[in-house]
Amino acid sequence: MAQDKTLAHRSGGGAGARTGMSRAARRRTAMILTLIGLLVGAVFAGAPVLWMLSSSFKPNPEVFAYPPRFLTESFTIEAYTSILNDPRQLRFFFNSYLVAICVALLSLLVAVHAAYAFSRFEFPGKRLINVIVISVQAVPPVTLLIPYFGLIVTLGLYNRYPGLILTYMVLTLPYAIIMMTGYFNTLPRELDEAARVDGTSSFGVLWRILIPISAPGLVSVGMYTFMLAWNEFLFALTLTRTDNMRTVPVGIQMLMGQHSFDWNQMMAMSVLGSLPVLVLFTFFQRYFIGGMTSGAVKH
């Protein structure tokens, strides 16, 4: 009997060890497959960016030379100097900066007040308005192009900055309101109550208490609205007519001639057009990530 118990104990221990080893092997396999998938994704995501950067320093004929090469034998900054010395191209950047900054600031101003109302107050029709805001966010922007064009022309805002700014605000406000509402919901209401005990008004609570501690949410919404306005192409092409109103994405498309393409200048302008977003994310990534994730966490 004692011998049978010893054998059973040993066989059970061996089975447990094999189970532990198989679990460890499965974890290693899953980790290896995950790393391979991430590597493949990084290659597919990074290769176009590296090609764009490399091509911007090539002479135009070398961009599509065969076989293709990432590194150029004739390094040149001709494409960049052509863009930076062209007043028309610089105007594209000025327009993009002006429109994107105005959209970001005005969208933040409206979204903060709307989100404060959704987060802190009960009023008739709140649920219906919330559904409308979410539904508008779900509508593909391209389906609104023709109605917006007619409205902008009727209002006399065609080929003018206010037309672009108002259009982009309508496109970005639903997301901005939803995100800021989620962020305000994570802030304890005790802060509001303590401020009101001291005689602070509702606007005072918003501007003196909530906004100063909402940097992650504000940065996330501001960066999102800025990036959308900076990168948007279709509405900028449709709602503007003259070169002095075009933005960077439209300016890149205008480098595509009927019989020839200035590929190196297109790549250089794409690099320059990517810099503002990269700089913003580099300096504010901590706030951006915090703001993007805070609304999903219940404090």
Image (tube, grey):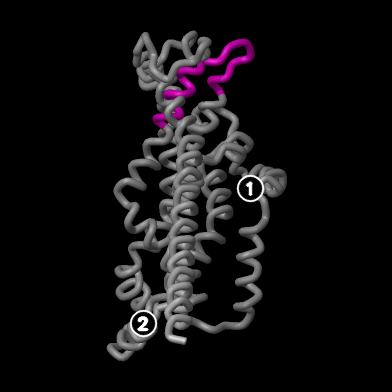
Q: Residue furthest bottom?
A: 197
Image disc number at residue 272: none
Kindly identify the amino acid type of the residue bearing the numbered disc 1: Leu
Closer to the camera in the image, 187 or 196: 187
Is residue 185 among the parts visible in the rendering?
no
Picture coordinates of residue 182 (x, y %)? 48, 70
Residue labelled with disc 2: 201
Nearest to N terminus: mark 2 or mark 1? 1
Residue drawn at x 41%, y 54% as measured from the top left: 222
Range shown magenta: 254-272
Is 267 positioned to the left or the right of 276 in the image? right
Pointers 2 and 1 in contact (C-beta within 8 Å): no
Is residue 189 among the parts visible in the rendering?
yes
Q: Quadrant of residue 10?
A: bottom left
State yes or no: residue 268 in magenta. yes
Picture coordinates of residue 96 (x, y %)? 45, 38
Up the image or down, 276 lies above or below 194; here it is above
Closer to the camera in the image, 53 or 66: 66
Q: Secondary structure at mark 2?
A: loop
Up the image or down, 190 lies above or below 151; here it is below
Picture coordinates of residue 163 (x, y %)? 56, 45
Residue drawn at x 56%, y 15% as measured from the top left: 261
State yes or no: residue 91 in magenta. no
Residue labelled with disc 1: 155
Q: Secondary structure at mark 1?
A: loop
Residue drawn at x 50%, y 69% as measured from the top left: 114
**Dot 2 alpha-carbon crowd within 10 angstroms: few under 14, some 14 to 19, many 20 or more:** some
Q: CA distance from mark 2 to mark 1?
A: 37 Å
